[in-house]
Image: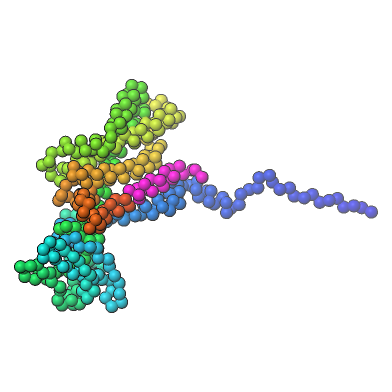
Amino acid sequence: MSVDAPKPQPTQPANPAPSAALIDPIQEVASLSQWQLIWRRFCRHKVALASFYLLILLYLMAIFAEMVAPTGRDHRDLDYAYCPPQLPRFSIEHGLHVHGMRVHVDPITFAKTYTRDTEWVIPLSFFVRGESYRLWGLFEWDVHLFGIHHAAHDRLNPSTPTVLLEGEAPRHLAPSFYFLGADRYGRDLFSRMVYGSRISLSIGVISIVITFILGIVIGGVSGYIGGSVDNLIQRGIEIINAFPQLPLWLALAAVMPGDWSPLRVYFAITIVLSLLGWTGLARVVRGKILSLREEDYAVAARLLGAGHGRILFRHLVPGFTSHIIVVLTLSVPGMILGETALSFLGLGLRPPVVSWGVMLQDTMQMQAVAHYPWLLLPVMLIVLTVLCFNFLGDGLRDAADPYAN
């Protein structure tokens, strides 16, 4: 009786080959560039991504301010001084509309009281014709993103309410639409906030450009040369950082002549903020240069005869560009808040220039804030912008190392 020998069992390899489903994503990631990996990781940060798109929307609003604003920057109607916000409504009969505001003027104190007139329907529409303007100072146009549909208003309201002052003839009120209310001169607060975004947001960007140049050059020279030059630059940075920031801003702003034009004051404020904001970036650049200047590729470039400037700006600085972008992004809110503080105190930009800080000058009296709280709405836009930049900086900081888990 013969016994069959047992058949040998196939042995499993110790390290099985990865499947094609696993190899494809790995090959896809390996083929991406550094910036593509950063963007891939940044997209996972939902709050930072939402802040990025919201900042794009804010800057588009600033670029097309003349078109977005329902009225002109200096358009005023004293009949509607301190008019409360008129929030749009929607109905099947009238579509998007607001109700007109009936004004009652006290004959003794001349105080105005506003009541909503439900019978006065003011239709609204998008891309309506209104006050003419020059887009970017080049093109004459009169189309606004949204506003009052005057043809439909005249059709729905053949007669408009009147305002009565003692001893004066009654005057017909023009249809009004103050989305976020009006100030003491009857100027649309929302339109002025849109125009103010052009100044407040651009100051942060221009200041960052100057800060970038000063921080890269001074910090790079300090870290690359080292020795007594490094000690001198670092002691200078420590002296600048030792001064209280707000009093130093006030001192530099007070030096500006009072007869300067608004444009010169604008550039002066930009330079002041830049001269005080480059120290943080310079410290970051110096630390990175100190750690990279002895790397093999830097030593090889030096042995091949490359100049110091080429080694510094062509080989070393690009190695930590993502970190520079993070530092600059987190510095923009400080620039915006600096301009707001100086303008609010009357030492920065002044009327007729419109910025968020200039608009907040109307809130220096507590009585005005108590009776007309909508004058504080520019603060909400400042807070929103600062938060967006902070969230964006956090997202970029997390994405700066694309190979991290």
Residue 69 seen anywhere in this rendered image of the structure: no
Does 300 sit left or right of 190 as displayed? right
Assess whether residue 397 is covered by the magenta stretch.
yes
- Give the image quarter of residue 126: bottom left
Q: In this view, does 392 lie above or below 320?
A: below
> Which contiguous range is marked in magenta?
386-405
Query: What residue is rendered at 24% in x and 46% in y?
Result: 340
Residue 48 seen anywhere in this rendered image of the structure: yes
Secondary structure mainly formed by the magenta segment? helix
Does 311 sit left or right of 368 as displayed? right
Residue sitting farthest toward the right:
1
Residue sitting farthest toward the top:
228
Q: In this view, does 50 lie above or below 167?
A: above
Q: Where is residue 39 in the image (x, y as percent from the top left)?
A: 42, 49
Assess whether residue 205 is covered by the magenta stretch.
no
Query: What residue is rendered at 37% in x and 26% in y?
Result: 305
> How many numbered discs, if any?
0
Q: Is residue 175 above or below residue 6?
A: below
Q: Nearer the viewer, residue 263 or 225?
A: 263
Q: Which of 350 and 291 is in front in this view?
A: 350
Q: Position of residue 270 (x, y in %)?
A: 23, 41
Q: Nearer the viewer, residue 397 or 247?
A: 247
Query: What residue is rendered at 23% in x and 70% in y?
Result: 116
Query: What residue is rendered at 23% in x and 54% in y?
Result: 369
User: Which color scheme did the rendering employ for the protein?
Assistant: rainbow
Q: Where is residue 185 in the image (x, y as percent from the top left)?
A: 15, 58
